[in-house]
Structures are given as C-alpha cells and as structure tokens.
Image: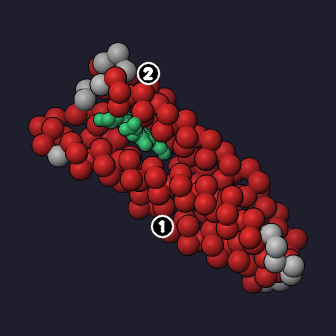
Amino acid sequence: MQDFFLEYKVIIVFLHVISAVVWVGGMIAMRFAAHQSFLKIESPHKRLEHIAYALGRLFNIVLPFVIILIVTAIFMIKGYGLSQSNFAPFSHLKEGIWTLMFVNLAIMIYRRNRGEMLLNKGDMVGAKAQIELIGKFMVPLNIILGITAIFIGTYLSSSL
Ligand code: HEM
C-alpha cells in the first residue's frame, strides 16, 4: 500500500482535502446561510418542510465525501506509517474525530427522516422536536469537530 500511496500521493491528499471542504463547508453554508433564510418563512409547516428538504440534499451530497475522507485517511495512515510514528496520537485523534462526526451525521440523517415522516403525517410538534436539534446543536458540533480535524491536518501536513 506504501508504494501505491507514494505513486498517487497528490491525488489521495487532494481527495482528502476536497472531501473535508465539501463536508465541513457544506455544513457551514447550511447553518449560517440557508438556515437563516429558512427562519424567515412564516408558516411553521413550510419552514420545517424546507429545512428537511435542504438537509436531505446536503446529507446526500456529503455522504460519498465522508467515505472518500476515511478511505484516503487509511491510505495516509499506511503510506506514512502513521501508527508506528511519533504522529500516532494525532492520527488516532483524527480517527476519533471522524468517528464522532460520522455517528453524529448518522443520527442527524435518522432524525431528519423521522422528522419528515412525522411532518407528512401532520405531527408538527413531533417533527419540530426531531429537526430542531439538528440545526441548534448537531450541525454546529460537527462544524467544530471538522475545524479541529482540519487544524490537526495542517499540523501534520507541515510536519510530515
Ligand atoms: C480519519 C482519520 C484522519 C487521518 C488519519 C487524517 C490524516 C491526515 C494527514 C496525514 C494529513 C496530512 C497530509 C499531507 O499533507 O500529506 C491530513 C491533512 C488534512 N486533513 Fe486529515 N485525517 C483524518 C481525518 C480528517 C477529517 C475528519 C478532516 C476534516 C473533516 C480532515 C481534514 C484534513 C485537511 C483539510 C487536511 C489538509 C491540511 C493541509 O494540507 O494543510 N482530516 N490528514
């Protein structure tokens, strides 16, 4: 795997970085641009409908990049021999962050789908309870985790 990594290092690191850009950038755009605009919709039903639709599209776009991010990370772990190096703690920290971000994303997808289902059944209170937490807490958490992972990546990139 080390030979493969060295031969395709530029493309592997590029795919890693672009995946982080799409995942973290997508969440920032959703939270601080799209979400603010949805809040101006007066009808609570329409507002939740638009938020659920936009979140669904965002999750579909980021999912392939989430997978590319971990696959390229595995190539880098093996290619740089990170687990046997002095950088092992940073590598493990990034693996932990990816795992937390992934679990958080999976729960967000579940809550969004449930919220949409309840909305279609006319249960506004239930739908709001499912969807509200995503924008208030779960997306911001993943943004903070993502920015932390990017910072550690910058450190690794300038030290390896
Ligand atoms: C899953 C575990 C991860 C590992 C083992 C890992 C490993 C690395 C390594 C070794 C580099 C340096 C590459 C080089 O310059 O040759 C790097 C860079 C980077 N990583 Fe990760 N990473 C992981 C997860 C993540 C996550 C979750 C994100 C963001 C969501 C992320 C974002 C970045 C970015 C943006 C860079 C480029 C930094 C720069 O070039 O200044 N990584 N990563």
Check mark 1 vs ligand 1: CB closer than 8 Å? yes or no: no
Q: What amino acid is at disc 1?
A: Ile
Question: Can you say which quadrant of the picture contains the C terminus?
Answer: top left
Position of residue 60 measured from the top left corner of the image (x, y, whole percent): 50, 69
Q: Which residue is mark 1?
A: 61
Few, some or many C-alpha atoms within 10 Å of disc 1 (few <14, some 14-19, many ≥20)? Answer: some
* 127 to the left or right of 23: right
Q: Secondary structure at mark 1?
A: helix
Earlier-in-chain disc, 2 versus 1: 1
* Residue at the image point whose x is 48% and y is 67% from the top: 61
Q: Secondary structure at mark 2?
A: helix
Ligand 1 rendered quadrant: top left
Q: Which residue is mark 2?
A: 89
Q: Judge whether residue 110 can be spotted in this image.
A: no
Position of residue 70 measured from the top left corner of the image (x, y, whole percent): 38, 46
> In terms of image quadrants, where is residue 32?
bottom right
Q: Which residue sits furthest top?
A: 86
> Disc 2 versus disc 1: distance between alpha carbons?
31 Å
* Residue at the image point whose x is 29% and y is 19% from the top: 84
Position of residue 82 measured from the top left corner of the image (x, y, whole percent): 31, 26
Q: Height in image: 85 above or below 129?
A: above
Observer-nearest residue: 90 or 158? Answer: 158
> In terms of image quadrants, where is residue 88?
top left
* 49 to the left or right of 23: right
Position of residue 57 measured from the top left corner of the image (x, y, whole percent): 56, 72
Q: Judge whether residue 65 can be spotted in this image.
A: yes
* Residue at the image point whose x is 59% and y is 57% from the top: 27
